[in-house]
Amino acid sequence: MKRDLVKEYLLFLQVEKGLAKNSFESYQRDLMKLVKWCEKNNYDVVQLSRQDLREFLIDLSAEKLSPTSVNRLISAMRGFYKFLQFDRHISKNPAEDLQSQQTTAYLPKFLNRDEIERLLAEPDVSGEIGLRDRAILETMYACGLRVSEVCSLQISDIELDAGILTCMGKGNKTRKVPIGKSAVEWLKSYLVQRRKKENLEIQNLFVSKYGRPISREGVFKLVKEYGTKIGREDISPHTLRHSFATHLVQNSADIRSVQQMLGHADISTTQIYTHITDQHLRKTYEKFHPRAKN
């Protein structure tokens, strides 16, 4: 029986590399596009040349993918053929020299401090759901968590007396993040309500009104709802993470510490926030310095 090397590579990413669920699914979708193209053209995916891969990308251009999506696809192919090369199925990686597409420099959206305060004040904390939402927003901004990390938090992951939270990030890597005083107080208030649900067997920290673990969609919905109320319809849960990092860097936090708190594997990912602060300084200079426009 012929080995399914694409399947073996995906299993390698999932098991040995510990790739996060969303990243794994993106790689899987991208490589399946290549597999289907090979089947359509009667090619063996293992034997493709660099020219074959270029033709594949040309054919794929009809889908009008964004440069970011194309680059992710190229990255997936590079990884797959590197895996084959390492396992001695091929002698040379045909995707190694494929050129990535130019993308516009991406600067994450973030909220200024006034917007953060207004957003946090939006939930009606006199009700159970509003109190939960306030605790979620406070925790996301205080700790810079990804939406998946918020949804998977367990009650046992938070040490309120110590002001420390433990979360499971990308690649199933755990990290500890300090929790600010304000978030601690709102979490305490929320947990008083949360513990009244004696019939709840689940240990997830944040639950829906039906007593189930809150979903990614649920968090997106509540952030969008409160964002719209303060005139920021464009925000998402990740905006709170960006705001957390941006405000730390603006206040001269050590970039390595910010990297650790965000759970970034590569510091270059964290350094995007220094570009945001550089841009902020430039705008401030141009607005207020008397000779900036001379």
Image: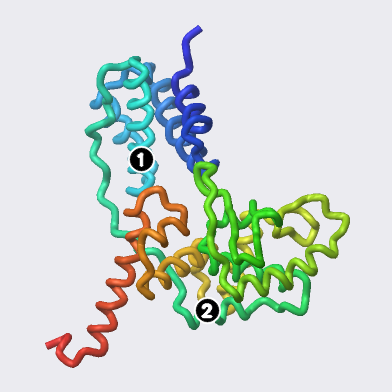
Give coordinates of residue 63: x percent, y percent: 39, 42
Instruction: Please name the residue shown 33% across and 27% down the image.
Output: 82
| Mark 1: amino acid | Ala
Q: Position of residue 1 (x, y in %)?
A: 51, 7
Nearest to the observer: residue 26 or residue 199: 199
Say few, some or many: other residues with alpha carbon within 10 Å of mark 1 (under 14 / 14 to 19 / 20 or more): few
> Is 42 in front, or is 215?
215
Residue 15 rendering spot, x and y as whole percentages: 53, 30
Residue 134 lies, in percent from the top left, at: 66, 72
| Residue under label 2 | 231
Q: Residue furthest left?
A: 294
Tell me which residue sits at (69%, 54%) in the image.
156
Q: Give left or right: position of 70 versus 54.
A: right
Q: Is residue 200 left or right of residue 143?
A: right
**Label 2 crowding class (10 Å Cα cut-off): few <14, some 14-19, many 20+?**
few
- Between disc 2 and disc 1, whose residue precedes? 1
Question: Which numbered dot is residue 62?
Answer: 1
Query: SS class of the residue under badge 2?
Result: loop
